[in-house]
Image (cartoon, grey):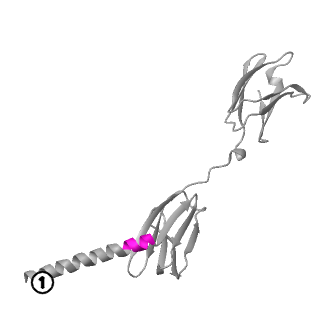
Amino acid sequence: MKTLFTLALAGALSFSSLASSAAEDLMALSNVKANFKKVNVLLKGGVGEAKVTLYDMSGKRLHQKKVKVGEGDIILPYNLSGLPCGEYQVKISTDEEEVVYTVATFDKPQPAEELPLMAYGKIMDDNTLGLVVIGLDEPGVKVEIFSKDTNKSIHREEITEAEGFRKNYKLKGVSPEDVYIYLKDSKGRTKSIYFE
């Protein structure tokens, strides 16, 4: 009886190690990566027939596909651009094994040249304007002050500070409410600032 129990225990341990080994094999033959809002599921040759299921953050099934992987690798791409950023799960299962990957999607950062020029103006006193420009990647901002009435240039200069600058402009013979500032940076972004 004791021998029979020992054999049963040994058999159970070897079976659990085989199941664990099978899951490790599928883990070695697959990979899931997110790049912004795109998820790629890689299945390497040797996986055989598999079912790939994509779930959202709440566990709702979004997509399921059966594939047969021969000798070559295959990639299943998922474009999640219409879905919110967050964690998603990809379950890959075969007849013998199953693995679950969790990936996080995120928005692609907006390129600096697509962001607006960040500049702010303020009336300091009866004849002084304050200008602040921030968030520059490259030096070089053309500053031009125009009369609102005539659209003629009153002052023009180029500032070559690297990241941003602050400057006050003293006006002669014209009120701050009667002018506007036009800015253009080295990337071609523009902004007009009016004072009321």
Query: Is 191 included in the stretch rendered in magenta?
Result: no
**Residue 140, quarter of the rendered image:** top right
Q: Is residue 59 above or below residue 68?
A: above
* Image location (x, y in percent) of residue 148: 86, 28
Instruction: Out of 101 and 120, give the one closest to the viewer.
Output: 101
Q: Which residues are magenta?
A: 23-28
> Residue at position x 71%, y 33% from top?
119
Instruction: Out of 98 and 190, give the one closest to the viewer.
Output: 98
**Residue 163, quarter of the rendered image:** top right
Q: Which residue lies most toward the front here?
A: 71
User: Are there few (<14), some (14-19), or many (20+) residues within 10 Å of tag 1?
Assistant: few
> Residue at position x 51%, y 75% from top?
44
Q: Which residue lies most toward the left here?
A: 1
* Image location (x, y in percent) of residue 143: 80, 30
Which residue is the site of mark 1?
A: 4
Instruction: Out of 184 and 25, give the one closest to the viewer.
Output: 25
* Image location (x, y in percent) of residue 26: 42, 74
Q: Could you tell whether 38 is left or right of 194 in the image?
A: left
Q: Is residue 174 above or below residue 77?
A: above
**Residue 131, quarter of the rendered image:** top right
Which secondary structure dominates the residues rendered in magenta? helix
Q: Could you tell whether 146 is left or right of 115 in the image?
A: right
Q: Is residue 191 above or below residue 17?
A: above
> Residue at position x 56%, y 72% from top?
76
> Residue at position x 10%, y 82% from top?
3
